Amino acid sequence: MKLLIAGNWKMFKTRAEAAATVTSLVNSLSALPEQREVVIFAPFTVLSTCAEILAKVPGISLGGQNCYPAVWGAFTGEVSPAMLKDSGCDYVLTGHSERRMLLGETDAFVGEKTAFALSQGIKAVLCVGEQLEERNNGKLQDVLVRQLAAGLADVPDNTSAAELSVAYEPVWAIGTGRVAGPVEITQAHAVVRDYLAMRFPLQGKDIRILYGGSVKPDNAKEIISLDNVNGVLVGGASLQAESFSPIALA
Ligand code: PGA
């Protein structure tokens, strides 16, 4: 299984800034090991710019941060999986906590997007994670299982492990500098792995589970070495090649 090192640029970067960052990433990751795969989840407006630079670069691909579950139509402000593909994307993020919390995306809507994106030939990274209050109230497992059940409800049973990944991102660790500890990460990833193994008996053990939340060059190696951690989803530290490349190579 290749480790998936994902960068989430959120709502940052003009086209010129994106081009500069992707160009330095390509240079600094020229020795990316065969067993690692890098994906950049970039804003829609810079996807084509990044795609041109990445066109002939093996090992680094592009993803959208969101999509709408329809082929086309009157959905102002939205983007379809086909449009993402047309802009050079292989991947899409679904259910990031910022979209769940700031834009009111429900578990069921996240599930619709995930299944639809897969049906259109885009690889999905479904994000799940608990809020601090939920964790403090002993609800970690309930929240993760609820988000996984709804997020994967319509995903076909024979979906291959290469097409689907899950990112565990505790909301309290995102953008806060407060990384989850090894015990917390291992515990949550075991919940996700058990669910995947139950939901997809054949391939569940091979579906990649990424950790996200304040991953930095100085903690990436330890996080990646934990049980059931098959990659990382990096926000702030993915914005500069100087901090993202060491994570990709950690
Ligand atoms: P962070 O963001 O690395 O800045 O905490 C992670 C994410 O939101 O995917």
Image (tube, rainbow, N blue to C red):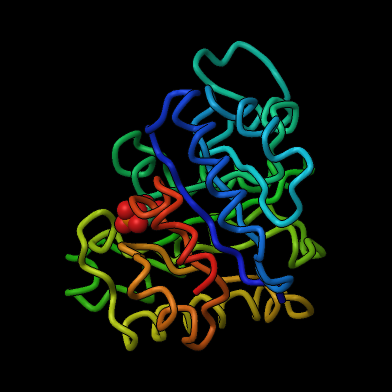
- The quadrant of the rendered image in which ligand 1 is seen is bottom left
Residues 201 and 120: in front is 120
Which residue is painted at 69% across and 25% down in the image?
A: 83
Q: Position of residue 233 (x, y in %)?
A: 47, 59
Give above or below for 206 relative to 119: below
Q: Which residue is more in the foreground, 71 or 219?
A: 219
Splitting the image into 4 quarters, where does residue 22 fall?
top right
Q: Quadrant of the N terminus?
A: bottom right
Q: Position of residue 211 (x, y in %)?
A: 44, 69
Residue 27 is situated, as x and y percent measured from the top left of the image, at: 60, 51
**Residue positioned most to the front:** 27
Among all residues in the image, which is located at the extreme right? 158
Q: Quadrant of residue 4?
A: bottom right
Seen at 48% across and 24% down, the residue is 16
Q: Nearer the viewer, residue 129 or 221?
A: 221
Rendered residue at 28%/75% (across/down): 180
Left or right position of 44 against 144? right
Residue visible at 66% across and 65% down in the picture: 31
Q: Looking at the image, how many numbered discs can be counted on the residues?
A: 0
| Residue 225 drawn at (x, y percent) | 49, 86
Q: Is residue 227 above or below residue 80?
A: below
Instruction: Answer above or below: position of 231 versus 86.
Output: below
With respect to residue 228, does 92 lie above or below? above
Q: Which sits in the foreground, 136 or 213?
A: 213
